[in-house]
Image (cartoon, rainbow, N blue to C red):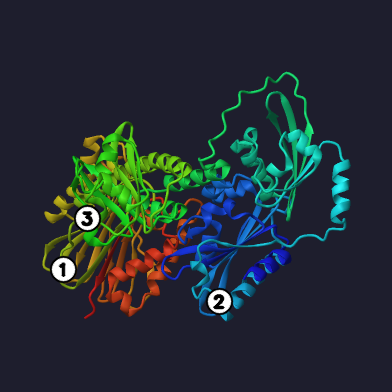
Amino acid sequence: MGTALVDAVQRTGASVGCLYLRSDADPVLHLAVLCGLPPELFAPWRQVPLAAPLPVSDAVRDGRLVWVGTQEELVRSYPRAAVALPYRFALAATPLRGRDGCWGGLLLMWPPTHPARLTDRQRGRITSSGRRIARQLDDFPIWPEGEPAAHGGGPRLVAPPTARRNATGRAAEDFAERLPGGSVSLDLDGRITFLTSGAVELLGRSADRLLGTLPWHSLPWLDDPVYEDHYRSAVISREPCSYLALRPPDHWLRFELHPDPSGISVRITPAPVVGDAPRRMEPPLSKDSARGGAGRLYQVMHLAAALTEAAGVGDVVDMIGDQIMPAFGAQGLVLAGLDGQRLRIVGSRGYGPYILERLDGQPVDTALTPAGDVLTSGTPMFFDSPEELARNYPQAPTTSDKKAWAFLPLIVSGRGAGCCVLSYDRPRPFTADERAVLTSLAGLIAQALDRARLYDAKKNLAHGLQEALLPRRLPTVDGLGIGARYLPASQGMEIGGDFYDVICREDKVCSAVIGDVQGHNVAAAALMGQVRTAVHAHSTAGTPPGEVLVRTNRLLHDLHVDLLVSCLCVHLDMTHRCAHLASAGHPPPLLRHPDGRTEVVSVEPGPLLGVAPDAEYPVARVDFPPDALIALYTDGLVEDPGCDLTDALDSLARCLAEAGDRELADLPALIDTLVRRTRPTGHHVDDIALLLLRSSPE
């Protein structure tokens, strides 16, 4: 696979190649092979959920080539990736489609000098490279370890193709020594592989203490994420860059970075800066503390961006499980929220039901787990082994078979919101860098969990209100089949003003109504309840459909409502097989005849309800023979900005006409078909109500 990836990089002219393979157990892509970049730069994407909004996930999930030509396009289409890699480059991702399915995805990156648009020839090379790798995976699906390639611990790094060097080693050294200033060579990992005597003099440290080290590790005055970020920018974008750095006490140096596929050549020259006072230098990190630098900084930003996308509590649990657990190598997760003086588990990974039942509902002062003490003190606790945990909490290690734990308090605005526990199957030490990053992430998790619980509470309130306002069940009418559906808008509070109802008046006689109150918020829902109640009351009294609208209109005018309301009333007489209809500015219904022919029913609409107090609503009569069907709907099903309403109605009528006997016998299934045909993406800015009425066959 390494050879195949290098070949794909060469054929497409890319600077970086990544081979992702699917997991057999989870909907996750694993970074299996990497070419052209050190693994540390791709740490946030070693494991990528298939559902994540990232180019390689979209390519595998949708089975298509994904192309992002500019940084601006990356920001628009994939903001999470743009946060963690804020550099200029172009990328493409294509699926690895094999004989029996998709193996994973191929991700390629180019310098920003690559044209923003792909030619057909370039597109063909990218997709054919993916097909070649897929064919090799079909023939050799198992790695030497005996496991699918996706299950390796970390990515396999392969060397990129490099240009042949003309100069011999000694001649090159002599050439570099004769140049003024200093010269340094870095490999793709950023480590110093060569430096001249001039560089040794300018950097102020002997060659033996610099060779093989990262400059921001061996030179305390370069130990700043800003300087490491310049290296990351050069190695990812393949563009030259330069910066100034102050070597204490007052020596300003200019660093020029010139990257290529094999590494980075660095020129160092004195750079006197006039008028700039040397800035105060921060003390270097102690030797026993791990340095995260820019890599860890961008990893935190990546995880933070992922948490901002979480809506409900379930999303927060999934984000932690899919993003944070792999980033820190954890095998277990327990996320608990504070409920009064007890900890309630809201999500978990890697624990059985018995353990969760034992932990759920424990009081804050329990001795069974440190979670309560962590939440009370607001200070995280890290335990490297069961023995360390048992010294302070003797009962805790017996709760599960885990061997190391990180207990993180979730604090929001000074109050405890819960506790996040990451656990490990083996003992392990927590470095100072990991402790600092996990402590920072705890604050982000706390805010995400607090938002998610509020979102879920609002969503449950909206659903409860909507269910209370719509009919709990529809009546049974002899000779009539009834199917109904309400779909909230894709965005907002998932509550709206669309409504429907069926009122049974006597045997084989009923009234059906559908309406739409402007907006999809609490005010619209409240008015919808009033309108539906008024229509229901008048219809139950046997009032004709036109008169029902007249009386409801007068009521709304007296209430001085500010929202517009459309409504369509249908009186069905199954004995005489006919229907009488009256409309208050509502979209016309569709009538499917027994032979399948479908038409838009011509109903002269009156004004919207509440607009004119003396409005009249004409009544239209249509035959409703056996096996005929009337479809009532709200405008959310057919209206789109910039689309012609007539074309949308024709499309809906064709879909209804093409319905087979099985769908006609199962009205909920027919509703699914109609919604899927009119809203194939599942997204709609307005709520939708749909009511189907079918005259039973003789």
As shown in the figure, which amino acid type bears the numbered disc 1? Val
Residue 411, position in %: x, y? 33, 37
Q: Relative to 47, does residue 657 appear above or below in the rendering?
A: below
Q: Which residue is mark 1?
A: 477
As shown in the figure, which amino acid type bears the numbered disc 2? Gly
Q: Visible in this render: residue 568?
A: no
Q: Which residue is mark 3?
A: 545
As shown in the figure, which amino acid type bears the numbered disc 3? Pro
Frontmost residue, 302 versus 122: 302
Residue 115, position in %: x, y? 72, 54
Say which residue appears at 44% left-offset and 63% top-offset.
680
Residue 610, position in %: x, y? 28, 41
Q: Between marks 1 and 3, how big is the CA–CA gap?
A: 18 Å
Quadrant of the image containing the C terminus: bottom left
Left or right side of 357 for 379: right
Say which residue appears at 26% left-offset and 36% top-offset.
376
Say which residue appears at 49% left-offset and 44% top-offset.
300
Frontmost residue, 78 versus 654: 78
Left or right side of 439 for 395: left
Q: Between marks 2 and 3, how big is the CA–CA gap?
A: 61 Å
Q: Which residue is mark 2?
A: 98
- Asked whether the residues under the numbered discs 1 and 3 touch, taking CB atoms below 8 Å apart as contact, a structural biologist would say no
